[in-house]
């Protein structure tokens, strides 16, 4: 059962990455020939975008924070980065090319979620 779920999750992740990459290329129906390195590169580019958004949101949150909150935000951000990196390294340690896709998607997804959390400011994370 676990293997079947892993295969289904892997297929969904590859499909999402292929669709995202193809959509960015302006050819949503022509995904033939997209390689794993190209999909990872696409996810890395999306992560870089969200990392820039995260940096902007973090700097604004620091500026807007009460003095008593600033050090807590710094501590939280350091801990979050450490957690994100360790969490995504778990996926990267898997076997096969799917592990590279899982790790890249982990970095993209977690970075996007944290950026949005900080951008929304007063929203409590869920």
Image (cartoon, rainbow, N blue to C red):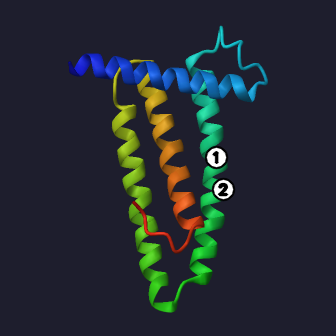
Residue 14 pos. (x, y %): 50, 21
Seen at 52% across and 89% down, the residue is 66
Residue 29 pos. (x, y %): 71, 14
Q: From the viewer's perspective, is 35 left or right of 93?
A: right
33, above or below 94, in the image: above
Residue 45 pos. (x, y %): 66, 39
Q: Total number of numbered labels? A: 2
Seen at 37% across and 54% down, the residue is 83
Q: Residue furthest left?
A: 1
Q: Quadrant of residue 44?
A: top right
Residue designated by label 2 = 52
Q: Quadrant of the N terminus?
A: top left
Residue 22 pos. (x, y %): 69, 22
Q: Residue furthest top?
A: 32
Residue designated by label 1 = 48
Q: Quadrant of residue 28?
A: top right
Seen at 39% across and 56% down, the residue is 82
Which element carries disc 1, helix, strand or loop? Answer: helix
125, above or below 92, in the image: below
- Rounded to the nearest angstrom, the CA distance separating label 1 from label 2 is 6 Å
Q: From the viewer's perspective, is 55 left or right of 83?
A: right
113, above or below 29, in the image: below
């Amino acid at each position: 059962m676990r293997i079947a779920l892993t295969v289904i999750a892997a297929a969904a992740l590859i499909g999402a990455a292929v669709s995202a990459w193809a959509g960015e290329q302006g050819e949503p129906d022509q995904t033939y020939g997209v390689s794993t390195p190209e999909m990872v590169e696409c996810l890395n580019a999306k992560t870089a975008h969200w990392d820039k958004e995260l940096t902007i949101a973090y700097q604004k949150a620091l500026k807007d924070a009460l003095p008593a909150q600033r050090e807590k935000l710094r501590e939280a951000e350091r801990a979050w980065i450490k957690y994100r990196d360790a969490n995504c390294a778990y996926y990267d340690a898997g076997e096969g090319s799917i592990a590279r896709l899982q790790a890249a998607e982990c970095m993209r997804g977690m970075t996007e979620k944290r950026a949005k959390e900080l951008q929304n400011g007063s929203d409590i994370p869920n």
